[in-house]
Image: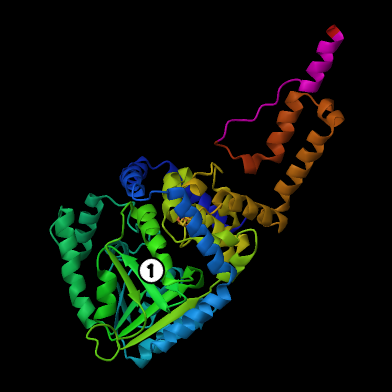
Amino acid sequence: MSELKDIFLAKSDVKAHDLEHKRKINFNIDKYNAAVIKGKEQFALLETARKQAKNIKWKAIEQLDKHLELFEKNFQEHGGKVIWAEDKEDALNAILAICKEKNARTIVKSKSMVTEEIHLNKFLEDNDIESVETDLGEYIQQLDGEPPYHIVTPAMHKSKEDIAALFHEKLGVPPGLSPTELTLVARERLRQKYTEAQIGITGGNFLIADTGAVCLTENEGNGRLSTAFPDTHIAIVGIEKVLPTLSDLGLFWPLLSTFGTGQNLTVYNSIFTGPKQAGENDGPREMYVILLDNGRTNLLRKEVRESMYCIRCGSCLNACPVYKNIGGHSYGTTYSGPIGAVISPHLSDMHDYGHLSYASSLCGNCTEVCPVKINIHEMLLENRHIYTEEKHGGVKEKLAWRMFKTGVLHRGLMNTANGKIKNFVFEKAFKSAWGDRRSKLVFAPKSFNEMWKERKKKG
Ligand code: SF4
């Protein structure tokens, strides 16, 4: 068993019994669920929209190389610079080189899971560069020294009272401030950072191949401020975020908003096609896009290729009974919940993260709620298959299943032992896999076949 699996099990056990955690999560997810029902009303043909989105992503990913090269060509034509990063180190080194060239001491960052994935803040901090999160949820998490809890709502596990206490402790403001007052405190502190920063770093929700554009979706305006004030803008985006054409946004923007937060459309949707052009007043002098692979091309294998269609709306997390019980931090990965369990073993390491695919009841709710109709629960099964085939789960369980298979496929063998013996063998063989929280599996004293024979004898 990998060390990370042990940690995952220990953390999950604690969270699953934390009733206060459950109360906060259910409160926030209930609000989300109510909003999504309303948001979906904007689609006259929701199923058609979802199928169309899946087809567009299929097209984008089937010709990923072509679309990325087209993006690069078009983006460069507007004066933008493109950096291809094969892994985390490539991306971090490129960012550091730009920071050194610009003599940057302060960076403002809008919300981006990719920068979490490459641990950018820590890296910059180690290089004496201040990196300030400007999304309110991320700002709260940064103050608390915690990674995001959820891919869309980073501080979902915190109540307004928790945040008031955190601001009081870390920023010295009076205790018990209201949400409006807390927002104003953050806003005042962040405004100053925007004007000080030399570089703004963002992620990107979509890359548009035919126009060479990076699209950013956010609700607070922090993304726009992070890109408008500093002289340099770096957008770091996973290669799977590509869409073939600008007109695809007409479908993807409302889908992302509705399934992400229940809104018809997110408040700020920006399209960046490069740095400020001659005659323009706003925007950075230089703009870079870092196209990040970092294991994404591993997802192109046929069993999990559909996971490349993910638009990171977070809907499958909110729908997952396991996520709601164990919370986002137990996973120990940047991407948590069902989609995190699918992609993390391929982005990182099957041995270290393959166990996450077992953290699912396979109820299929994740697949049901996905706006791009990704077959998530089937890919969890595919991962389990790969995990077992590659023997990451250890040989013990594999042997136990082989014994079980041999037994159930041979009637004679099944009849040689009574229920008591079968219970004993099963308990010994599957002890660790079955766990101690499930009720015991009890075999009938006699098999159906034995009972059938007896009945026939009686005539
Ligand atoms: S897998 Fe689907 S539901 Fe889950 S985050 Fe991605 S797009 Fe949203």
**Residue furthest top as drawn:** 459
- In the structure shown, which secondary structural element does the residue marked by tag 1 occupy? loop
Q: Is mark 1 within 8 Å of ligand 1?
A: no
Q: Residue 116, can we see it?
A: no
Closest to the observer, 409 or 272: 272
Please give left or right for residue 367 compared with residue 17 in the image: right
The magenta span reads 438-457
Circle 1 residue: 112
Residue type marked 1: Ser
Quarter occupied by the C terminus: top right
From the top left corner, tell me how far across and down residue 381 is, in percent.
62, 50
Tell which of 110 and 427 is nearer to you.
Answer: 110
User: What is the crowding at mark 1: few (fewer than 14 residues within 10 Å), some, or many (at least 20)?
Assistant: many
* Residue at the (22%, 50%) spot, across then down: 161
Counting from the top left corner in percent of width and height, residue 113 is at 41, 66
Residue 312 figure quarter: bottom left
User: Residue shown at 37%/71% (left/top)?
Assistant: 215
Q: For the point 18% across and 67% down, which residue is it?
A: 187
Q: Is residue 404 left or right of residue 232?
A: right
Asked whether, in this view, residue 355 is left or right of residue 239, the answer is right
Q: Is residue 454 magenta?
A: yes
Image location of residue 430, percent across then percent down: 68, 40
